[in-house]
Image: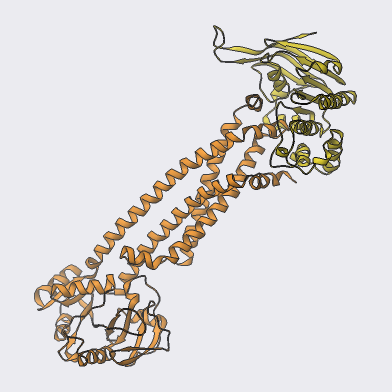
């Protein structure tokens, strides 16, 4: 499934230089291809995460459209947009995103449970935990895990519904080399299986796994 | 795990947060129900006292001391006695506007096996009485014989037992229902019984005031005024035309009690309002802080496709479970406290205190429960709505 951004802009009203506003994302067009890993690099504060959140349906753009297939996702009401995200977009946010009141296994199963489709969730969640190498921690709680393990939990959770679109924001931010390789390998495999994968990262290693690379600079995307 | 079990997992996972919120709601429910039950008990106590006295006017000997003694007997529970000539009963009966008169006889025991302190003995004439008999009828259908007594509910003797006053054994034939007034500490008998006791007390030299023939004295006369007559006018007429007596309107005797009750009720109501305003502000602040603390958690839920309405439902379920638990405990504690300490409250306030019946208490409890749950839910919902206006993307960015 193709995810497209059409002239997407995000404007914040905040004192910036001599103006009272600034553009985190400025008139950006973008196509996330199926079966490919697309990487966006850029300096901190360049607008990468804002752009990813807009693509994920988590942050309304000031102008422009985000199309998933034929659907303008921001024309949907919150209920429909949430369901669309649950079914089609796996998001791996920055930082620690484990839910502390749930075990690792429950965290991974959650996207399935939300809309009452949890029949075969256990099996799928167990397989994903095995794939990301934390199956032995299934009954632990996120606060008992290392940073790398929590990140792998988030990846397994994002893949739980086998979404056609995966958006990963610095997925290897605090991982060691070994774990970084594992995570990139998993995302590459998801793309090889047909998913559209967007990778927002600082890691230069990621370029080995990417099919297309973009640079974000002052809210503008340019292909490298 | 289902989506419905998520709020319960959240509640279990943070026991200190759960306990803090439950305690706040507990406080709300406890003050509202405890205060309401106390006010209702005071009002019911006054109503019971009015009904138990059953008369429009009470006539006592004209010394200031006797009026004070009467109030002491009825309101403070201090046993006492005073007497006047029986002739006045006929004179009072002839006053225009008087429908019914009944004489009573008071005697204070020195001590008895039932009680650590002297008790008030009240004698009445079953043939004319309209004040005590209706109450006795509720627990004893027979005619009271000589040396048969009916005891107030605070008298520590069971029906079938005996009480000894001035060397005479009296049979306890019935126990009256609780009124929450000092009349619960009294012992009731017919005229013959009390006359025998007065005679026995005089014989033992313990009743200096009753050197007269017991057949020629009474302590007070209770009057029921005919419909259409002004009670104040009848009271004034007796005070002017019947010598050596003092007529007191029952209501005016109870005015002091009613005033005190009004004052205490106001204080309780102000206290309830103050606690509720404080707790209300606290609840809004706590829920806002709690939601703020959990905003990243909620953003993660949004990332996974949880809609705003699903999140609001989750927050509301959590707050409802917490507030319901806190409220139930608060209500239970309030009922326990007010019922356990009713005698202490009665003694401390020096006001009649009669707990409301089960139905009224249950209704008050349900209203308290509903009010606490609704207010907590509104506070939680307000915080959740505020959070839902912020894009999940912004929240996720904030944390990094």
Residue A5 falls left or right of residue B396? right
Q: Residue B72: x percent and y percent?
A: 24, 72
- Residue B344, by quadrant, is bottom left
Could you say which is closer to the camera, residue A128 or residue B141?
A: A128
Q: Quadrant of the C terminus of chain B?
A: top right
Residue A48 falls left or right of residue B127? right
Q: Residue at x 18, y 68 (%)?
A: B232
- Who's yellow, chain-wise? A
Relative to A43, say whether B227 is above or below: below
- Residue A196, by quadrant, is top right
Q: Residue B260: x percent and y percent?
A: 28, 60
What residue occupies the far top of the structure in this picture? Answer: A18
Report if residue B382 is visible in the image: no
Report if residue B140 is visible in the image: yes
How is colour applied across the structure in the image? by chain
Q: Residue B187: x percent and y percent?
A: 32, 82
Could you say which is closer to the camera, residue A87 or residue A170?
A: A170
Relative to A189, say whether A146 is above or below: below
Q: Residue B290: x percent and y percent?
A: 57, 38
Relative to B34, say whether A122 is above or below: above
Relative to A192, say whether B59 is above or below: below
- The colour assigned to chain B within the rendered structure: orange
Residue B184 falls left or right of residue B323? left
Residue A121 falls left or right of residue B31? right
**Number of numbered callouts drawn:** 0
Could you say which is closer to the camera, residue B143 or residue B13?
A: B13
């Amino acid at each position: 499934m193709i995810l497209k951004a059409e002239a997407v802009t995000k404007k914040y009203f905040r004192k910036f230089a001599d103006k009272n506003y600034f553009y985190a994302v400025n008139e950006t067009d973008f196509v996330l291809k199926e079966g490919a890993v697309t990487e966006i690099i850029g300096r901190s504060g360049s607008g990468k995460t804002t752009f990813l959140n807009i693509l994920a349906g988590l942050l309304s753009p000031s102008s422009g459209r985000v199309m998933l297939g034929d659907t303008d996702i921001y024309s949907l009401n919150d209920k429909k947009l949430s369901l669309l995200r649950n079914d089609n977009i796996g998001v791996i946010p920055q930082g620690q995103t484990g839910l502390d009141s749930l075990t690792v296994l429950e965290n991974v199963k959650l996207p399935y449970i939300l809309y009452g489709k949890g029949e075969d969730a256990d099996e799928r969640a167990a397989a994903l935990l095995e794939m990301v190498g934390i199956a032995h921690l299934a009954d632990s709680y996120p606060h008992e895990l290392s940073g790398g393990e929590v990140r792998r939990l988030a990846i397994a959770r994002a893949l739980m519904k086998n979404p056609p679109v995966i958006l990963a924001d610095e997925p290897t931010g605090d991982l060691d080399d070994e774990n970084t390789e594992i995570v990139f390998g998993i995302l590459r495999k998801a793309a090889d299986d047909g998913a559209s994968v967007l990778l927002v990262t600082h890691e230069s290693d990621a370029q080995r796994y990417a099919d297309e690379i973009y640079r974000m600079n002052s809210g503008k995307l340019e292909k490298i | 795990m289902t989506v419905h079990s998520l709020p319960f997992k959240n509640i279990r996972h943070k026991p200190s947060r759960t306990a803090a919120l439950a305690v706040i709601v507990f406080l709300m429910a406890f003050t509202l129900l405890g205060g309401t039950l106390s006010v209702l008990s005071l009002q019911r106590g006054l109503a019971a006292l009015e009904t138990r006295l059953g008369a429009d006017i009470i006539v006592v000997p004209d010394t200031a001391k006797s009026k004070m003694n009467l109030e002491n007997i009825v309101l403070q529970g201090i046993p006492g006695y005073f007497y006047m000539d029986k002739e006045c009963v006929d004179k009072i009966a002839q006053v225009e506007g008087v429908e019914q008169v009944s004489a009573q006889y008071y005697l204070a025991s020195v001590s008895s096996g039932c009680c650590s302190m002297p008790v008030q003995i009240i004698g009445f004439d079953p043939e004319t009485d309209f004040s005590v008999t209706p109450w006795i009828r509720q627990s004893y259908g027979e005619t009271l014989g000589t040396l048969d007594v009916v005891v107030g509910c605070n008298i520590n003797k069971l029906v079938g037992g005996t009480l000894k006053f001035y060397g005479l054994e009296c049979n306890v034939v019935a126990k009256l229902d609780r009124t929450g007034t000092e009349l619960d500490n009294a012992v009731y008998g017919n005229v013959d019984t009390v006359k025998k006791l007065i005679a026995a007390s005089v014989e033992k030299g313990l009743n200096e005031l009753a050197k007269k023939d017991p057949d020629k004295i009474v302590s007070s006369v209770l009057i029921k005024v005919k419909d259409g007559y002004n009670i104040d006018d009848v009271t004034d007429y007796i005070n002017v035309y019947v010598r050596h007596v003092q007529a007191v309107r029952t209501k005016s005797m109870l005015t002091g009690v009613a005033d005190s009750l009004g004052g205490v009720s106001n204080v309780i109501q102000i206290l309830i309002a103050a606690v509720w305003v404080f707790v209300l502000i606290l609840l809004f602040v706590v829920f806002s802080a709690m939601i703020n603390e959990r905003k990243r958690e909620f953003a993660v839920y949004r990332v996974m496709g949880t809609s705003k309405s699903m999140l609001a439902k989750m927050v509301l379920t959590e707050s409802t479970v917490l507030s319901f638990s806190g409220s139930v405990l608060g209500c239970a504690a309030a009922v326990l406290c007010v019922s356990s300490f009713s005698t202490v409250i009665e003694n401390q306030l020096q006001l009649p205190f009669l707990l409301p019946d089960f139905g009224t208490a249950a209704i008050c409890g349900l209203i308290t429960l509903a009010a606490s749950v609704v207010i907590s839910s509104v506070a939680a919902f307000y915080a959740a709505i505020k959070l839902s206006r912020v894009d999940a993307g912004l929240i996720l960015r904030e944390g990094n």
